[in-house]
Image (tube, grey):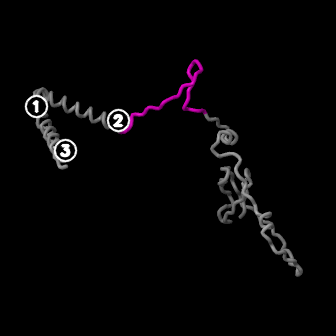
């Protein structure tokens, strides 16, 4: 089945079974236009009688050049402002610059914290928390005597990690 785009008139071929009697939504790969295609009813065309005396003209390179179809270049880019405004009615605003109340433009800078900044911040907070716990473990164990073994296990695990890291560094 040969189908033409309604917008840019580009031709496409589809299998006859691709379009059902209820229609099918199609989109042009060239211009992005969408439409519902219904099956085309074919008219029976009478066969053309072949004539016995036909002249065959030899084709030359000049004829091929004349008859070759040049592909039409797109006049407007699909992502340009004018295409989006024409097709969808959208207008784009430049987000990198903002106007002050006085009307002068200033460049807007985006600040992000970043992965490594989060990692450093969390590690500093964790070290500070462990240091605070080390300083106040006597007070905590007096107030909550059942927490003493857990605090001791925590500091033993931290000591094991410290020794392991120091041995890994000294292997070099």
Left or right placement of residue 55 versus residue 89 in this view: right
Instruction: Please state the horizontal and vertical placement of residue 109, each as a whole percent of the image.
Output: 48, 30
Q: Quadrant of residue 127?
A: top left
Give the foreground label among 1 and 3. Answer: 3
Q: Which residues are magenta?
A: 93-115
Q: Secondary structure at mark 3?
A: helix
Around disc 3, counting alpha carbons within 10 Å, would you say few (fewer than 14), some (14 to 19), or many (20 or more)?
few
Residue for point 64% across, 42% down: 80
Residue for point 54% across, 32% down: 96
152 or 58: nearer the viewer = 58
Around disc 2, counting alpha carbons within 10 Å, would you say few (fewer than 14), some (14 to 19), or many (20 or more)?
few
Instruction: Please state the horizontal and vertical placement of residue 162, each as a whole percent of the image.
Output: 17, 41
Q: Secondary structure at mark 1?
A: helix
Left or right placement of residue 124 versus residue 93 in this view: left
* On-image quarter of the N terminus: bottom right
Residue for point 74% across, 58% down: 70
Residue 60 shown in magenta? no
Please tell me which of labels 2 and 1 falls first in the chain: 2
Residue occupied by mark 1: 145
Residue occupied by mark 2: 117
- Using the image, tell me which numbered label, if any, was put on residue 169: none
- Using the image, tell me which numbered label, if any, was put on residue 165: 3
Q: Main secondary structure of the magenta part?
A: loop
Residue 105 shown in magenta? yes
């Amino acid at each position: 089945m040969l189908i033409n785009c309604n917008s840019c008139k580009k031709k496409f071929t589809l299998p006859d079974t691709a379009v059902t009697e209820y229609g099918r939504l199609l989109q042009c790969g060239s211009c992005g236009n969408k439409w519902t295609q219904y099956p085309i009813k074919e008219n029976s065309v009478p066969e053309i009688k072949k004539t016995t005396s036909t002249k065959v003209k030899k084709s030359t390179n000049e004829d091929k050049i004349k008859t070759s179809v040049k592909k039409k270049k797109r006049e407007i880019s699909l992502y340009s402002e004018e295409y989006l405004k024409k097709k969808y009615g959208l207008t784009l605003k430049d987000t990198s610059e903002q106007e002050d109340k006085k009307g002068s433009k200033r460049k807007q800078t985006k600040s992000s914290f970043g992965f490594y900044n989060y990692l450093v911040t969390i590690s500093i907070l964790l070290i500070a928390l462990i240091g605070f716990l080390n300083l106040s473990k006597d007070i905590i164990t007096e107030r909550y005597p059942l927490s003493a073994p857990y605090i001791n296990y925590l500091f033993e695990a931290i000591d094991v990690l410290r020794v392991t890291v120091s041995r890994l560094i000294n292997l070099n």
